[in-house]
Image (tube, rainbow, N blue to C red):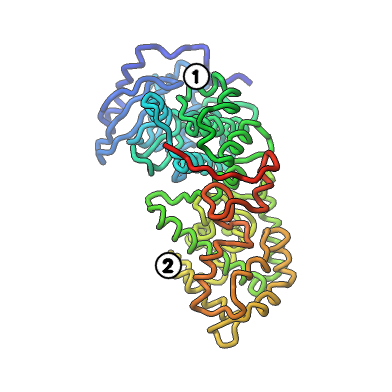
Amino acid sequence: MPSPFSAHLPVTNTLAVGVRSYVLQQYYTFEYDLGLWAFGALQVIKDRRSGTLKTCKAVEKMRLFDVQQVGDRLRRLKDIHHPMISGVLDILEDSQHFFIISPHAAGGDVGDWLDRLAADEEVLEEEICARYVAQVLSALVHCHSCGLFHDDLRASSVLLTSREADARVLVGDVGVLAAMGIGSKDGRVADLRSVGMLALAMLLGLPPSQVEEDLERHLVSGELWSTRSQEAFDFVKMLLEESPEFTASLALCHPWLRNVLLRPGLADDLAREDSLRRLACYQVALLLIPVEMAQRDLERMLADFHRLDKDGDGLLASRQGMQLLLARGACQQSSEVAIGVVDVRGCGTLDFSAVAAAALMVNLLKDGLMKHRVDDIWRCLQKAFFKAYSSNRLSADRSCVLEKVSNSVGDLLESHGAVEFEEFLDAFDDDIREDSLLPKLTESAGHGTPLALFEFGFLAEEPDSWFSSFYRTCGQPIRRREAHC
């Protein structure tokens, strides 16, 4: 089927001075031109009502085969919302153009930033590289779960909210190529390869234009690899292999990224504390499932999980987890809070154990969930734990807890949720007291569960683990190296 976009008609140079349209002038004032993008002029405008800056991308209608179809597709992009996506705020049009209005990113784009760093012979710290790549992948997880692929992901479409190192990433132009009827046969593979290229450029301090020119040489003998971790090299190599089975969700589980916490706006120590508290809530919910949830209910949930897991990677996007809970009769607000708690790292991916824990929270803690605060939810879960496992509501015997979770429901969680209750409970003394429950769970950081933090991989407190061998490209132990900037 022919594309509705005529790639044979070049963008004229006169567009470099931008487009002035009466439609735009009704709502916005012109600020300055940014030049050209793939389909027309690019400029910064100011909202007349709010005074906020926006980015406007013009698309020439004369270059489109089916103007109405493209317009309808572009307008549907307004429904795509995610914290790491620079979404479409509005679509305006006049007789000659469509205008795609999106938020203005004060930090510019990663492409320009990498060019400046390369010119100054500076490179990014590896932790910043990992954080930016994880945010891009989080955005892709959401898009791919909607059946939407970027297909033109490059450094210039990865935007930054500020010029500070802790800036939030915003992926721009999501779905635009699809709206134009252009795209590769496998958008997921193309998107992940682009992430690999982006990670390579950031890790080696290369201008994006140089990466594609001599990819093999940069991958094998880049001079900065000696300053980067083995996990980073393995990650880039894996994405550039273009495996059709690999997904953005699995990439977020790679040892290079699995300890990266995506809590924009929180300092590192607060983000860590927040994630460990959410992790503790998740762990107690897992301990309650074998005594609070019927086997048939958990089996039905597992079937729903597999039905939604269309790519078969064993992971759902947060929006799909929400969809599952809502289908079970949960209210919107409680579902959002529960999913937010079990999304421990804030990356937007959920395995079966996390979805089951969220369902338990919704069922057991309806009133507590409405308060929105993680601390309130923790207190409700702690009370429920000692009610279920203690006769005096003050302490519980560890062996008694292990015996009670070792039933058919617990077996289902272990076999399909990758939970190891015996390992999990090894973190506790024989007598589990109320004042020791949270400290012990925080110290264990999810040991015995698939959401364990800081056990292995880049940024880990321990350098190796059995799980990391799943991702290795060779049998050598993972080596930790300090990144330089």
- Residue 459: image location, x then y, percent: 51, 49
* Residue visible at 34% across and 23% down in the picture: 34
Tag 1: amino acid:
Leu
- Residue 412: image location, x then y, percent: 72, 64
**Quadrant location of residue 342?**
bottom right
The residue where tag 1 is placed is: 64
**Quadrant location of residue 57?**
top left
Tag 2: amino acid:
Lys
- Residue 27: image location, x then y, percent: 28, 33
Q: Is residue 157 above or below residue 380?
A: above
Disc tally is: 2
Q: Secondary structure at mark 1?
A: loop
The residue where tag 2 is placed is: 371
Q: Quadrant of the N terminus?
A: top right
Question: Is 58 in front, or is 201?
Answer: 201
Question: Is 348 in front, or is 303?
Answer: 348
